[in-house]
Image (spheres, rainbow, N blue to C red):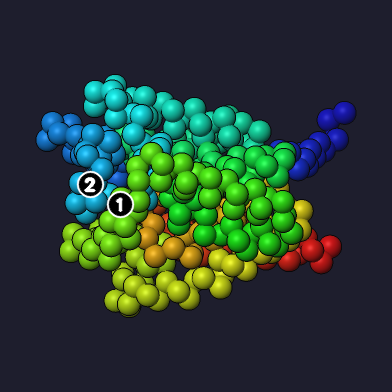
Amino acid sequence: MSGTTILPTPATPSQAPDADNLLRLSLLAIAIGLSMAPAYRFVGSMIWFREYLGDYQVFWGISAVPLDRIYDHRVFAYPPSALMLIKPFGWLPFWPSLIAWSAAGVAAISFALRRVMGPAAIALGFATYAGVGVLVGGQISLFIGALVVAGLNAPSSRWRGVCLAAAAVIKPQSVLAAPAALIAERKWGVIGWAMASGCGLLLLSLVLFGLDPWVRWVGEMPKFRAYLGLRGIDRMDVGLYGLALSFGLSGWTYLLGIPLGVATSWLCFRHETAIVDRYAAFAASTVLMSPYTLYYDLAGLTFACMAMLLDRERSPLIWLAAALVVSSVFASMGIILLAAMLSYEAVQRAKA
């Protein structure tokens, strides 16, 4: 029929351009690109100077130093109880020790996250500045992230308390959000197990290392803060402390972020929330409440942000916040936005 006009078939929704998905993938690509720039600089500097520049030389060196000399090093600020994790790796030569340390960290965080997010999010989490920096630099963040994730996701109060207590005695500032979160959940059993386990681990450290390292640690803390300022390391802070310094404000302005941190933990743990959101809220709240956060402390949070960026159902503002955190460059702004959005979504769920 030559006189018949054939009209074009309308595009179905699946054929139409997916603007939200394009935005999400663009943010993911930009975030990874921004985060890898300092990672290449970090690794490239070691190759160029033919010298290992990572922090693991401190951990490995401390493991071989006599106990009465540990806190003569301004670069080591962990409590003596952290030596229970660090000391065994010092029995190996440096390079085998670094490989064993990084492999153990990868195994720990991967095992903890296996039921929380898909393998793609875990793999992409390692392809960031936080991921590469922790693996090559030999930082402790993967162990801390694994303990916190396990503590939030464990099926029993006992293991939740034990895991959170272990994280606390290794790096106390890593669980600043725990009181608000656990009280909001009314998990009195977890609180009890955490207190008992923490006391037990501290007593064990006293048996192993004695009281003197604890006395020296407490006395060295003010000197450590002065050391950070002298070396300009405090200006590398990716939390609100560093953000305040970048605007010429006093570092103590970070205290203004504590109410947001407490509110985020409280709201996200008060009602039923997905474990990825709970961990992200816990980690973001901890950063908001901490006066000292460097890029490697975001390693665990980076995995949660990757899971959010791979989730098509999340809001564009959550994607933006996650991308800012992953970038490391704009992490402080991303943490504020992420905390605000997680709090908002928690309130909306409560109303529903």
Residue at the image point whose x is 47% and y is 46% from the top? 203
Residue on which the image places disc 1: 212
How many labels, in total?
A: 2
Cβ–Cβ under 8 Å for marks 2 and 1: yes
> Gap between marks 2 and 1, in whole Å?
8 Å
Closest to the observer, 18 or 299: 299
Few, some or many residues within 10 Å of mark 1 (<14, 14–19, 20+): few
Q: For the residue labelled by badge 1, is the local secondary structure a helix, a strand or a loop?
A: helix
Residue at the image point whose x is 59% and y is 57% from the top? 178
Residue 246: image location, x then y, percent: 31, 69
User: What mark, if any, has residue 68 been given in the picture?
Assistant: 2
Q: Amino acid at mark 1?
A: Asp
Q: Point out the image quarter for the N terminus.
A: top right
Residue 125: image location, x then y, percent: 48, 38
Residue 266: image location, x then y, percent: 66, 64
Residue at the image point whose x is 15% and y is 34% from the top? 51
Q: Which picture quadrant has residue 223?
A: bottom left
Q: Is residue 244 left or right of residue 270?
A: left
User: What mark, if any, has residue 127 been given in the picture?
Assistant: none
Residue 168: image location, x then y, percent: 49, 50
Q: Does residue 119 appear anywhere in the picture?
A: yes
Q: For the residue labelled by badge 2, is the local secondary structure a helix, a strand or a loop?
A: helix
Few, some or many residues within 10 Å of mark 2 (<14, 14–19, 20+): few
Q: Which picture quadrant has residue 187?
A: bottom right
Q: Does residue 22 appear anywhere in the picture?
A: no
Residue at the image point whose x is 33% and y is 60% from the top? 218
Tell me: residue 98, above or below residue 245. Answer: above
Closest to the observer, 203 or 328: 203
